Amino acid sequence: LAALPRLDAQMAARVAAARKKGNVLRYLARVDRRVVRVGLESVPEASPSGRLQGLDNQVVLFTDRYKANPLVVTGPGAGAEVTAAGVLNDILAIATRAQGR
């Protein structure tokens, strides 16, 4: 974590470049039949992902039926405490299974 301040200038440049285009930065996961990509992307501020606020999560489905106008599901995220509890539960479950081997 001590090294994070070295990335501040690079991140500020990415934010400025996105704003110049009318975009915002969002962490997105994209899945298709062959590839999964997860990372920080510049998206239009007026897009469904660009309008996300706070802890909201979103799934955007592009299908043959929803090509031009995707199906968008948005709702509250779990938040830090619930997410941490879920991760801890997963770790404990993995440890329990590993002991049984």
Image (cartoon, rainbow, N blue to C red):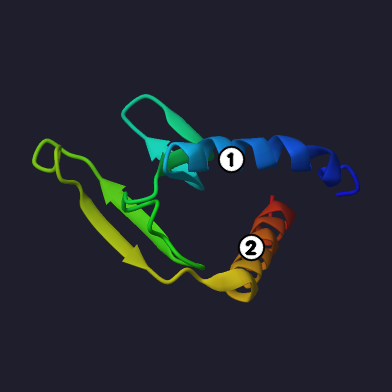
x and y percentages locating residue 20 in the rendered image: 49, 38
* Extreme residue in the front direction: 20
* Extreme residue in the bottom direction: 81
Is residue 7 visible in this depiction of the protein? yes
Tag 1 secondary structure: helix
For the residues marked 1 and 2, what is the alpha-carbon distance in whole angstroms?
Answer: 34 Å
Tell me the mark number nearer the camera, choosing from 1 and 2.
1
As rendered, which of 47 and 81 lies closer to the eye?
47
Locate residue 6: give its quadrant: top right
x and y percentages locating residue 22 in the rendered image: 42, 43
* Extreme residue in the right direction: 2
Residue drawn at point x = 86 percent, y = 49 percent:
1
* Extreme residue in the left direction: 65
Q: Is residue 43 left or right of residue 2?
A: left
Residue drawn at point x = 37 percent, y = 36 percent:
31
Residue 24, above or below 81:
above
Residue 65, above or below 58:
above
Residue drawn at point x = 51 percent, y = 68 percent:
54
Is residue 41 visible in this depiction of the protein? no
> Looking at the rendered structure, which numbered label has been put on residue 97?
none
Residue drawn at point x = 68 percent, y = 59 percent:
91
Mark 1 is surrounded, within 10 Å at the Cα level, by few (under 14), some (14 to 19) or many (20 or more) other residues, namely: some
Residue under circle 1? Answer: 16
Residue under circle 2? Answer: 87
Q: Earlier in the sequence, mark 1 or mark 2?
A: 1
Mark 2 is surrounded, within 10 Å at the Cα level, by few (under 14), some (14 to 19) or many (20 or more) other residues, namely: few
Tag 2 secondary structure: helix
Q: Is residue 67 left or right of residue 48?
A: left
* Amino acid of disc 1: Ala
x and y percentages locating residue 24 in the rendered image: 48, 47
As rendered, which of 65 and 99 lies closer to the eye?
65
